[in-house]
Amino acid sequence: MSHRHTTRQTNRLLASVAVIAVVAPLATACSDASEGAGGNIARVGLVCGGMTPMAAQVAINQETFPDDVEVEKYCFDSGADAVKALVGGSLDIFMGSIEHVLKTRAQDLPVKAYAGINNRAPYALVTAAGSDVQSVADLDGENVGVTSTGSLSDTELHQAAGEAGVDYDDLKVVDLGSGSSMAGGISQERVAAGMVSDPQKSQLVASGDYRLVWEPSTDYAAIVAVANTEWVENNESEMKAFLAGLGEAAERTTEDPTFAVEALQEEDFGVDDAVLTDAVSSSTETIPDGLVVTQEVYDETTAVLVDAGVVEEGDVLPYDEVFDFDLLESDA
């Protein structure tokens, strides 16, 4: 059974993390994180507002988890806040990115990724329909919107610029947030183009007032299930049950996209069912087989992160030190 939590409850999570950071050494925080909530509960954090963690959203809203685990959902505005909660012990699992794993491990904190649910970076560059911008090359020297500097949207902008032979530093990057602020920035020509993800991307393009300039073409481990390794060791049954629920949601979504559409209607994205159905159809293609991120995808992901300066090359760990897929259910 799953429960949805409010922003107020999320803020209490962050407050508890702040207390830990002030009054306890890092080792104590790690110890707290290994204990978890107990009682067959898995506290799961997501960056809400978009459908990048679609399989997790579907699993939680459709309650595909076994009866022996209760999943509590917590929404965060940023991955950095969720990582703080994970490290501090206020979260058990975070649906984050490879970058979060590598940066946390660089601080000698014991986390790993236990499943992958999205193998494609979610953001695309969108411009106004009547814009003169036809390609990323046309953005040289122009204002370009990202959700926030240092975010995944910014990382993807690095990638887009590199592919087009444009120096990222020659772009005038503007933090616009997401939703209506990003759409307004593009339509009012405060930026020549902006980074958006689904379902907003599908909604804007379907309106006819916007068009795509660039979408990622390479695989990228965008969302993985990140957890403290000590918590997993102490709560293996809860982690296996959570992963089983993710797998069930991914399988049922692939077989019948309307299963996901029904679940995502609870997210209140503010888009009609036709747009949501299109977004689900395209997002379904990004779910990796068996929820396993391959070595090849990991290598492509870390190459983007290093090129964008998000992680240092020396902080890129071997594949088997980042992932542990042993708890995933197998058809074999």
Image (tube, rainbow, N blue to C red):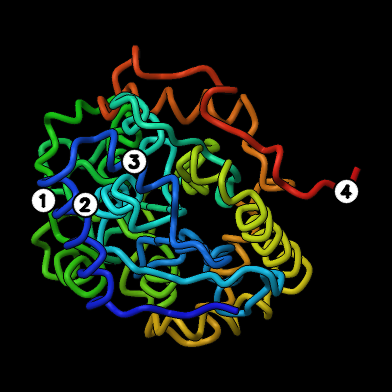
Left or right: residue 7 versus residue 327 is: left
Amino acid type, label 2: Val
x 70%, y 44%: residue: 327
Q: Earlier in the sequence, mark 2 or mark 3?
A: 2
Q: Residues within 10 Å of mark 1 (few under 14, many from 20)?
A: some
In the rendered view of the protein, which quadrant contains the N terminus?
Answer: bottom right
Q: Disc number at residue 146?
A: 2
Amino acid carrying label 3: it is: Glu
Q: Residue at x 24, y 65 (%)?
A: 178
- Label 4: state its secondary structure: loop
Nearer-N-terminus badge (1/3) = 3
Which circle's residue, 4 or 3, is located before the other in the chain? 3
Residue at image mark 4 = 331
Q: Where residue 118 sits in the image (x, y, percent)?
A: 55, 50
CA–CA distance in space, label 2 to label 1: 6 Å
Three-letter amino acid code at the position of disc 4: Asp
Q: CA distance from mark 4 to mark 2?
A: 41 Å
Q: Secondary structure at mark 1?
A: strand
Label 4 environment density (alpha carbons within 10 Å; few <14, some 14–19, many ≥20): few
Residue at point 19% right, 50% down?
Answer: 20
CA neighbours of label 3 inside 10 A, class few (<14), some (14 to 19), many (20+): many
Q: In the rendered image of this protein, does residue 51 appear above or below residue 259?
A: above
Residue 17, label in figure = none
Please, what is the three-letter code of the amino acid marked with disc 1?
A: Val
Residue holding disc 3 = 156
Is 52 located above or below residue 112 in the figure? below
Specify whether 211 is left or right of 323: left
